[in-house]
Amino acid sequence: MCGIIGYIGEKVEENLLQGLERLEYRGYDSAGMTINRGGEFVTYKATGKVENLKKTLKFNDDLGMGIAHTRWATHGKICIENCHPHFSSNGNVALVHNGILENFEDLKAELSKEGKYFYGQTDSEVIAKCFDRLDIKSLRRVLGKLQGSYALALIAKDSDSIYFVKNKSPLYVGFDGSQAMVASDPSCFVGILTEYYTLEDGEYGRINKKEAVFYNKNNEKIEKYITKLDFKVSYEEKTGYDHFMIKEIYQSRIALENIIERYKQEEIINKLKLLKNYEFDRIYLVGCGTAYHAGLIGGYYLREAFNVDVFCEIASEFRYKNLNIDDKSLCIFISQSGETADTLSVLEFCKEKGGKIVSITNTEYSTIARLSDICFPICAGQEKAVASTKAYFAQCLIFYIITTFLKGKDYILPLQNFKRQIDFGDDNILKPLAKNLVKYDKVFFIGRGVDYITAKEASLKLKEITYIFSTAESSGELKHGVIALIDSSVPVIVIATDEKLFNKTLNNAYEIKSRGGKLILFTSLQIDKDIKENFDYVIEVKKTSKEFQSLQMILPLQKLAYFTAIEKGNNPDMPRNLAKSVTVE
Ligand code: F6R
């Protein structure tokens, strides 16, 4: 995580600030900026969000050069000392870092013996302390010492260039004769540059207004292809909404419309055909957090359609399972950002083993997309709120499309019908429920079959933005232990969309009621009045066709999490301790 940016040109503070605002999704523990003006450094630092840094800035329209950083803390507490940029001991070199230096303790001990003083606790400061001067030779010497992941941007008081390095953290660079830039995300170039270079692992170099010089990991000078900045970064405003999260929940409908349009195109049909031609005898679905839950839904679709083993795996656990990956393995990676380090490292592992690599992502220029044999876009548009909502919805839809296409059936008409039926739930019921939920310090979710997956996703959404302890259990598993936690202080949200499983789920709900637990039912089924009376709340969600019912159900549950966060006074867009893009393992 963390976002880094460097800029040479006019209005340095303004352009760096704009970049930081675009990178803030990568972390918002602190933000900092160092500008080289006439051979002297001017530094600004603030804990918390970029808006805090903005208040301290003195804007200057003259030519200049600077680097900036937005932090998601890994090593060392959130304080000004640990805020980037960091400096060499002689103060000549300033650096910003995204990644984790794995051997920082050893290096720090070595540098301390040389008499170097450390003002903070970060691994990044250790890299800065390895420098005294900045040129390609000293950069190479320091790179030889580093182990771990790092995207670095460096400036020196006596240099006209930004130096850069990329290893396992994303970095892009660009210049146009009057300005130059490096950034963790090419969205920072929008409105400034029209072309950019994508760095690969091990590459490094320097850039100024006139030229970019690149070296590969073998220290050979290389030429790189330039990419046109052809994607539009729509800087979504909250217009009409209090937060991005609630806007994005409603944008699920737009994502569905975008998918319908894009998945009619030949470009996508060709990808689907290519996938259909693959020979595989196993499918692995890999992701983290919400993306993993979308994989569980994908597994549910694929298993219903095919007689083939489907394994859904959490990326960070994948390598410990000794799974059998070979050229008969279809490996599907789900990632909104396309940069999640855990997911990316499994992708690289599966690629090395000869697996067929498919990704489902919202970021078509991302590393995961670039490394895939086939990349399916989810067409959700920029997702700014940290808690993923419309991306989950869209990822599940892509699994529906893939499964339906592989079965040889039409997917457009069912999607169009679903679009007409989407129901976001009744705020007049959800808001009072949220008001009630904040009184509790824990909430349980239960469900069976696909409803258990929805329960997991709903529970994750609730805990990450309300900080209320929450967990999801399969209804049948309760009595094997978890029911010991149930008493009158525990609300249990029961999710029921499957007619065939309803009676069993109902019995499990009654087991909770007998022990005093509060029951809240989210259902799309027609339920008798006397059954409803057993529940403290009943939230009825519109029925849609079976394959979309779990997607329909997640929408009001996402809104419930949102309203509960608001009741608690939290900012649902930027929950504590989290970041939108998780680029460390
Ligand atoms: C939760 C959430 C996270 C992400 C996870 C993977 O709301 O957003 O759990 O789903 O960090 O991120 P991506 O999809 O970018 O790989």
Image: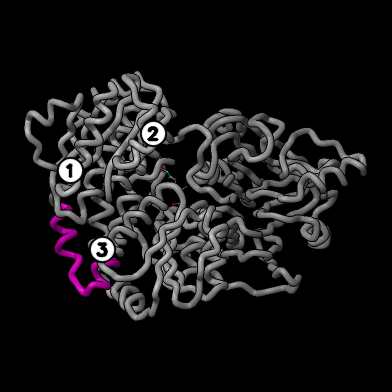
| Residue 9 falls left or right of residue 140 | left
Q: Horizontal and vertical percent for residue 81?
A: 71, 32
* Most foreground residue, 226 or 502: 502
Residue found at x 25% / y 24%: 514
The local secondary structure at tag 1 comes to helix
Q: Which residue is mark 1?
A: 502
Among all residues in the image, which is located at the extreme front? 480
| Residue 545 falls left or right of residue 236 | left
The region drawn magenta spans 400-419
Dot 1, how many residues are within 10 Å of its Cα: few (below 14), some (14-19), or many (20+)?
some
Instruction: Identify residue type, mark 3.
Output: Glu
Magenta includes 298? no
Dot 3, how many residues are within 10 Å of its Cα: few (below 14), some (14-19), or many (20+)?
few
Instruction: Identify residue type, mark 2.
Output: Val
Which image quadrant for residue 242? top left
Magenta includes 409? yes
N-terminal label among 1 and 2: 2
Magenta stretch, overall SS = helix
| Residue 372 falls left or right of residue 246 | right
N-terminal label among 3 and 2: 3
Residue 92 shows up from this direction: no
Which label sits on residue 482? 2
- Display coloring: one colour
Q: Nearer the viewer, mark 1 or mark 3?
A: 1
Q: Which residue is mark 3?
A: 304
Residue found at x 40% / y 67%: 283
Residue found at x 34% / y 74%: 271
